[in-house]
């Protein structure tokens, strides 16, 4: 099949998309931009208002019939807003896209607005080649995927991530036989990814003025947290051993600690919290993993525990037709077999697979930020990835 990806248009789209701010909780302007691109391509457009200021938008290219439906899925929200003080002056962490020396810079280009623009380029290439697909081809641009959640005083839409948009998508008509998720995978085919449990451990103590705290240091909730942290650090390797998957070792992290009031250090804190991120492989039921986590937490004296995130992982069989289609398309474009991978990050495949949608993660380079430049991707990588998507769509949906 002769396909040509319009590189200039792909670059223009990517720069424009990166320049639309879409921090978690405020994705609607980016959804509107994608909706406009869908209409320009002649796709059927479905708008899903997830909540105020947040929307999914679904574009569908109807097939000629008798073919499977393939979904391209990508999240609209970015990991940061660009307003964070520690990101100032770093161009790849700002919602202002630009091209330099064959690379595109800007907030969200790798995670994952570059993939969204590759989906558009793939459809454009198929249309230009005069291809008619048998099955429907869908592009789902969704809100709220980034790994974050409401907790404590952190309330509101900007904290509602972890597949918020894709959960709404699949319960409001966004169903398909298969899905390609363009998360940044270094062009490896990800057959499985881990899920996670987030758990809070809390110690308590008296809230008193420093002047009256003599002899009560051991009652201080921060001091009481010290042996808890020691116990956690001793236990984490056990969790990582038990939560290994297909040769990939489990992983866990001490993600945050909160206690006291920096603006009022003359008071001992009434409570100190320790937050853990415990990754869970896709073959371990979340209820089982939750029991194991709480079993450890409840063995600690004087500690309150709460599990406040349970986000399952996802997997796909190595011989699934979708995997074959993506790997075949990759080999045609890159001239070499695609590598396979298992990752310990989360994606919306967690939700999609639970609706019976076979899902594989395959995308560009991660564009991992460096200290000076932030997020950036090579134009050539985007062009080749878009062609892989187009060829995979033809394989999955079938050509009439």
Image: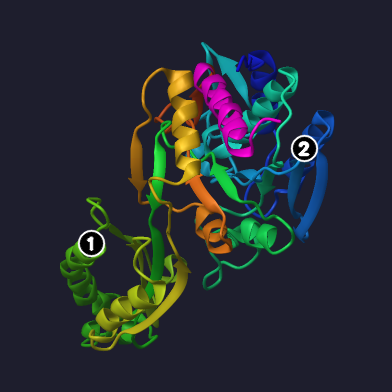
Q: Nearer the viewer, residue 72 or 24?
A: 72
Residue 306 % position (x, y): 41, 80
Q: Residue at x 40, y 43 (%)?
A: 190
Q: Nearer the viewer's eye, disc 2 or disc 1?
A: 2
Q: Residue at x 42, y 76 (%)?
A: 307
Q: Residues within 10 Å of mark 1 (few under 14, many from 20)?
A: some
Whether pointer 2 and pointer 1 mark residues with C-beta atoms closer than 8 Å, the reply is no
Mark 2: secondary structure: loop
Q: Residue at x 78, y 40 (%)?
A: 62
Of all residues, the one furthest to the top in this rendering is: 101
Image quadrant holding the N terminus, namely top right
Residue 325 % position (x, y): 50, 35
Residue 266 % position (x, y): 38, 75
Residue 255, relative to residue 366: is it above or below? below
Q: Is most of the magenta stretch helix, strand or loop?
A: helix
Q: Residues within 10 Å of mark 2 (few under 14, many from 20)?
A: some
Q: Quadrant of residue 394?
A: top right
Q: Which mark is residue 394?
A: none
Reply yes or no: does residue 398 show up in magenta: yes
Residue 300 visible at all: yes
Residue 104 % position (x, y): 56, 22
Reply yes or no: does residue 158 show up in magenta: no
Q: Which mark is residue 64?
A: 2
Residue 220, relative to residue 193: is it above or below? below
Side of 105 where 7 appears, left or right: right
Mark 1: secondary structure: helix
Q: Which mark is residue 240?
A: 1
Image quadrant holding the C terminus, namely top right
Q: Read off the magenta span.
A: 380-400
Residue 365 visible at all: no
Side of 226 where 197 appears, left or right: right
Q: Nearer the viewer, residue 350 or 367?
A: 350
């Amino acid at each position: 099949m002769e396909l040509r990806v319009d590189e200039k248009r792909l670059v223009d789209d990517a720069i424009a998309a990166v320049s639309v701010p879409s921090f978690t909780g405020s994705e609607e302007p980016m959804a509107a931009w994608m909706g406009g691109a869908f209409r320009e391509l002649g796709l059927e457009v479905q708008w899903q208002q997830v909540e105020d200021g947040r929307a999914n938008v679904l574009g569908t290219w109807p097939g000629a019939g008798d073919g499977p439906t393939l979904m391209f899925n990508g999240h609209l929200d970015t990991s940061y807003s660009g307003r964070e003080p520690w990101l100032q002056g770093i161009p790849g962490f700002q919602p202002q896209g630009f091209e330099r020396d064959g690379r595109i810079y800007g907030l969200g280009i790798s995670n994952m607005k570059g993939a969204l623009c590759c989906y558009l380029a793939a459809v454009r290439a198929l249309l230009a080649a005069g291809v008619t697909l048998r099955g429907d081809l869908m592009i789902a641009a969704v809100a709220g995927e980034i790994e974050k959640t409401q907790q404590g005083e952190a309330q509101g839409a900007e904290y509602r991530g972890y597949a918020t948009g894709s959960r709404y998508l699949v319960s409001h008509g966004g169903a398909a036989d298969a899905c390609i998720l363009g998360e940044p995978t270094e062009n490896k085919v990800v057959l499985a990814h881990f899920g996670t449990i987030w758990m809070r451990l809390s110690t308590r103590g008296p809230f008193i003025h420093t002047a009256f705290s003599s002899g009560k240091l051991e009652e201080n909730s921060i001091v009481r947290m010290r042996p808890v942290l020691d116990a956690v650090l001793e236990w984490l390797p056990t969790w990582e051993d038990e939560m290994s998957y297909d040769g990939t070792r489990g992983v866990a992290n001490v993600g945050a600690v909160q206690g006291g009031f920096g603006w009022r250090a003359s008071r001992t804190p009434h409570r100190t919290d320790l937050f853990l991120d415990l990754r869970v492989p896709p073959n371990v039921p979340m209820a089982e993993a939750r029991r194991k986590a709480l079993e450890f937490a409840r063995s600690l004296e004087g500690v309150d525990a709460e599990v406040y995130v349970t986000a399952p992982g996802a997997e796909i069989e190595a011989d699934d037709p979708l995997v074959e289609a993506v790997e075949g398309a990759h080999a045609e474009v890159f001239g070499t077999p695609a590598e396979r991978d298992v990752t310990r990050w989360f994606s919306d495949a967690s939700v999609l697979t639970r609706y019976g949608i076979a899902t594989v993660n395959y995308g560009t380079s991660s564009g991992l930020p460096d200290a000076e430049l932030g997020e950036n991707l090579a134009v050539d990588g985007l062009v080749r990835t878009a062609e892989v998507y187009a060829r995979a769509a033809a394989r999955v949906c079938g050509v009439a």
